[in-house]
Image (spheres, rainbow, N blue to C red):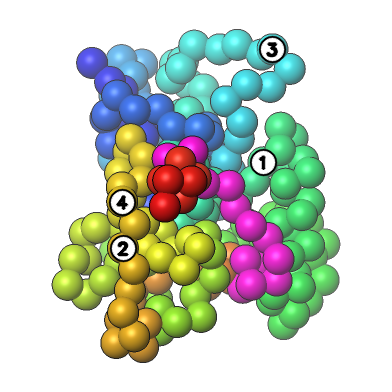
Amino acid sequence: MALQNRVDPFGEIHAVPARGTLMGNRGGCLHTPGRQLTSRRWVSPRWIACTLEFRGWHREVMQPGRYTELFFLDEATAFAAGHRPCLLCRNAEARHFVAAWLAGNPKAGPLRSVDVLDRALHAERVDPLTRRQRTGRARLRGIPDGAMVTLDTAPGAPLLVWAGVLWPWSFDGYRQPLAPGESALSAEVTLLTPPSVVEAFRAGYRPTVHPSCRAVMGKS
């Protein structure tokens, strides 16, 4: 049976076979010695997204007392769920993201430590009352590539904004894209990706997306 460690764009954790292209964690152990997920959904504000392979390191998933490995379809999914690039295994991407985040959020001031960034992201990603994902509202027109949204007509169906169209998300990859009409572009949608991350996208950070997105683009 699949372990419950696959993350969707809402930040929820599921047990499905598809692994995705990135791994990550939320600062510590979220599972029991029997590799079952507890009710806890994070240990610290340091939610990171890592490569699947790094320096040939190998470890058994969900070891007792060790951090819980989480898996994401792609980087766009990880960002929507509230994770940022790991400074160790994805150092180049992390530095690029921090620079874009600072450029897109100038009121944040100097970043003395990555802990400041993590705390800022945590305030955007989690509602303190419900402990569920905090979302925003924005007009579809102008939302940058890489952000995840939902339409009011289908609040449970996440969509990736990419190359001028909307890509229905699934654990296995993206489905055939939808071209929004003029009225849809002017309408408000629910924004899953944290707002400061969206500003980092506007400032030049372009998250990686699953190959299924590029494959469909190549056929169009």
Q: Amino acid at mark 2?
A: Leu
Mark number for residue 178?
Answer: 2
Q: Amino acid at mark 1?
A: Cys
Q: Amino acid at mark 3?
A: Gly
Asked if labels 4 and 2 touch by Cβ distance under 8 angstroms, the answer is: yes
Look at 46% across and 68% down and name the residue there: 164
Secondary element at tag 2: loop
Magenta region: which residues? 199-212
Instruction: Please state the horizontal and vertical placement of residue 20, each as a whole percent of the image.
Output: 44, 32
Q: CA distance from mark 3 to mark 4?
A: 36 Å
* Left or right, 153 with reference to 49: left
Q: Quick one: label 2, few (<14), some, or many (20+) residues within 10 Å? A: few
Q: CA distance from mark 3 to mark 1?
A: 17 Å
The N terminus appears in which quarter of the rendering?
top left
Instruction: Please state the horizontal and vertical placement of residue 40, each as a whole percent of the image.
Output: 35, 41
Mark number for residue 60?
Answer: none
Asked if labels 2 and 1 touch by Cβ distance under 8 angstroms, the answer is: no
Mark number for residue 176?
Answer: 4
Q: Nearer the viewer, residue 157 or 25?
A: 157
Direction front: furthest residue: 220
Instruction: Please state the horizontal and vertical placement of residue 140, each as a whole percent of the image.
Output: 40, 79
